[in-house]
Image (cartoon, rainbow, N blue to C red):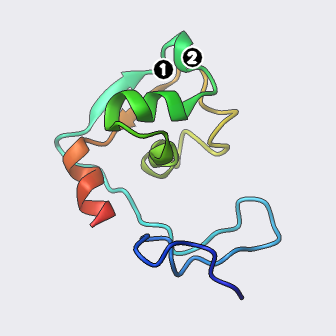
Amino acid sequence: MADFHDNTSFLKGAGTYDNFLDINKLPAIKATVSDKVYQIEPKYHQKPEYLAFDLYGTTRLWWVFALRNVDIIKDPIRDFEQGTSIYLPSKDTIENIKG
C-alpha cells in the first residue's frame, strides 16, 4: 500500500484505502480538563474547517472534532450540525498530537 502523506505528518503511516473514511492509525484524542464544551454555531454548520481555522489557525485540523467526539460525530461533515454540543480540544492538546 502506498504512503501518500508527507514524511513529517503523523499520518505518514496511515496509507490510503479504497473504502470511504477507512483510514487507520489516526491519533486518539482523549478527554482532558482543558477541553471546552461548545455548541456548534450556525456559521460553522457542516463546516468544521472554518471552526478549526478560527480555533487553531488552520483549516487542516478539521478532523480533530470528529476524533475527540466519536460518540457524537460519525460523519465529520454531515454530523457537524448547528446546535450540536461537542468537546473542543485545547490548542496545547492539538500541539501535543502534532508533535
Say left or right for 30 vs 53: left
Asked if residue 97 can be seen in this view, the reply is yes
Within 10 Å of the Cα at label 2, are there few (<14), some (14-19), or many (20+) other Cα atoms?
some
Q: Which residue does the image show at 45% across and 47% down from the upper left? A: 61
Residue 86 — which label? none
Q: From this view, report whether residue 5 is shown above or below residue 82.
A: below
Q: Crowding at label 1, few (<14), some or many (≥20) Cα neighbours within 10 Å? A: some
Viewer-proximal residue among 8 and 74: 8
Residue 30 rendering spot, x and y as whole percentages: 32, 56
Q: Please report the residue visible at 31 percent of the width from the left and 42 percent of the height from the top.
A: 89
What's the amino acid at mark 1?
A: Ile
Quick one: 30 or 1, which is closer to the camera?
A: 1
50 w.r.t. 4: above or below: above
Front residue of 52 and 86: 52
Instruction: Kindly identify the residue that appears in the image at 57 percent across and 17 percent down.
Output: 82
Which secondary structure lies at badge 1?
A: loop
Mark 2 sits on what residue? 82
- Where residue 56 sits, quadrant-wise, is top left
Percent across and percent down for residue 22 are 70, 67
Looking at marks 1 and 2 on the same chain, the residue that comes earlier in the sequence is marked by 1
Question: What's under tag 2, amino acid-wise?
Answer: Gln
Residue 76 percent coordinates (x, y): 62, 42
Task: Name the outermost residue toward the right.
Answer: 18
The quadrant of the rendering that contains the C terminus is bottom left
- Is mark 1 in CB contact (under 8 Å) with mark 2? yes
Between the C-alphas of marks 1 and 2, the distance is 5 Å
Label 2, secondary structure: give it. loop
Identified at 71% across, 59% down, the residue is 21
20 to 15, vertically: above or below: above
User: Badge 1 is on which residue?
Assistant: 40
In this picture, residue 86 sits left or right of residue 44? left
